[in-house]
Image: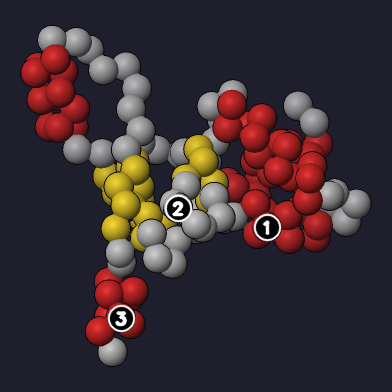
Amino acid sequence: MTKQRKLILEILGSTYLHPTAQTVYEEARKAMPSISLGTVYRNLGVLVEEGSIVRLSAPGLPDRFDLPRSLHWHVICDNCGTVKDVPVDSELINRINSDSGEEITSYLLTAHCVCRECRKAAND
């Protein structure tokens, strides 16, 4: 594993805030001033492809990234891009297994919303 990729994983592992590539780049430059934004994007892509991290997307907003430390789902605000973790509903997984007659081996749920803060701002 390259030192750039290792640094990116360390950055993602140090936060639960689901940073953008730009945020990862800004943090990476503190430890490795010569790293380029292109290198960060390329390595994020590789880490997503190999399944080490998760890319979270909302229309018109920058992608965010997560290093899964435990099983959880995500809720993303389509307005501001805020990402919140939501516990996995094991009863839902069991019901899908039962209803489909199959055994679910992996899953990723991303729900989209307009968060409370954005709804409040729109009503003010």
Q: Earlier in the sequence, mark 3 or mark 2?
A: 2
Q: Are marks 3 and 1 in contact (CB under 8 Å)?
A: no
Q: Which residue is mark 1?
A: 22
Tell me the distance, in whole angstroms, between the alpha carbons under discs 3 and 1: 27 Å
Residue 68 in the image: x percent, y percent?
47, 38
Query: Which amino acid type is marked by label 3?
Result: Ala
Q: Earlier in the sequence, mark 2 or mark 1?
A: 1
Question: Is residue 36 shown above or below 6?
Answer: below
Q: Earlier in the sequence, mark 3 or mark 1?
A: 1
Q: Residue furthest front?
A: 60
Observer-side mark, 3 or 1, equals 3
Q: Which residue is mark 3?
A: 122
Residue 67 in the image: x percent, y percent?
52, 41
Query: Which amino acid type is marked by label 1?
Result: Gln
Left or right: 40 as drawn, with respect to 52:
right
Question: Is residue 65 shown above or below 91?
Answer: below
